[in-house]
Amino acid sequence: MTWQEYQLATSKFYEKFESFGKISHNILIPDRLTGQNRQVDVWGEIYVGNHIVTMLIDAKFRKDKLDIKDVEEVEALGRAVKANKVAIVTSSGWTEPAEKYANLSSIDLRIMNPEQALDLIIENKWFMCYSCKDECVIMDSDGAIYQEDSGLFFIWYSGKCRNCKDIYFHCPACGDRKILEKNDKYKCDCNHIWKKNKDELMIKFKGFKSFQRIDNKKKIPVEFLFWANGYPKEFWGRLVFSTLEIDTDKGNSQYFLITPDGGLATPDYLDEDGPSFFFPIQY
């Protein structure tokens, strides 16, 4: 992650206390002596009766521990902008002398590691990349394909590291999980062959002669994956009577509808307004 993202994550962390006041992110505050604007990572204003208690929170995204000099600089910034309270949030901890100085200066020190920070700002974060360590995998390529010959849905979960672009996938049908680097190929226990082609996820289904890209298939609601995996209706009930267009393994697309009892239906015909007259099918 970048230091700007870490700064934003720090702000997001303190925003949960906004019921007590106001939190601002990356703002400029005039220096009390020179009047020159000073950049502040996170600024809090806490309302206590008719009083406002101000708080400066400085975000330090780094690999090295904080030392005394770091704490002194933030302390000086707090005085310059007339903060009543100062805190430092860091990704890598601090030295013992820095902790002693902070305690004597009533400065709070907090640790928020990259994974905790990414949890706050990345909506589709899957898990931390095993290769990059401090970067995460975005789960944005999962989906489903309708297999025309078998009449079944093939479901997969997949994501990509934001930094190294390694592709992680999980095939629920056989339970295989794999990391694909560069131009890796891998045959899962379903006998499908998975491949990374640059930044694309490709698959050659068992019995097919060529690969097809699957990370660019039509997006489907996550509730459909819940339905296909047999979750209770409370997880997929929103889809009842909603029309879903799903790609097929032969390059076509098919319309489906989930019935109130959890059954599956397909349209009898299509008109200019979309699919009509659904009838149930066995799944």
Image (cartoon, grey):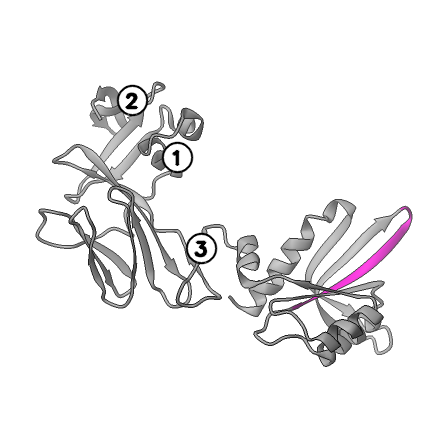
96 or 146, which lies in front?
A: 96
Residue visible at 75% across and 52% down in the picture: 22
Q: Please say if 259 is above or below 139.
A: above
Q: Quadrant of residue 27?
A: bottom right
Does residue 273 appear in the picture of this structure?
no
Q: Nearer the viewer, residue 186 or 27?
A: 186
Q: Residue visible at 19% across and 48% down?
A: 189
> Where residue 30 sits: x, y (%)?
80, 71
Does 114 sit above or below residue 207?
A: below
Using the numbered discs, state the Cα–Cα distance from disc 2 to disc 1 in whole angstroms: 14 Å
Residue 231: give its label. Answer: none
143 on left or right of 78: left
Crowd band around label 2 with a 10 angstrom C-alpha radius: few (<14), some (14–19), many (20+): some
Disc 2, SS: loop
Q: Which residue is mark 3?
A: 127
State the SS at label 1.
helix
Query: Is 52 contained in the magenta span?
Result: yes
Give me the residue at 34% from left, 30% from top: 230
What kind of element bears circle 3? strand
- Residue under numbered circle 2: 263
- First reached walking from the N terminus: tag 2 or tag 1: 1
Of badges 1 and 3, the one in the foreground is 3
Q: Is residue 25 visible?
A: yes
Q: Which of these two is toward me, 143 or 36?
A: 143
Q: Position of residue 90 (x, y in %)?
A: 64, 67
* Residue 223, disc: 1
From which residue to which does the magenta span run? Answer: 49-59
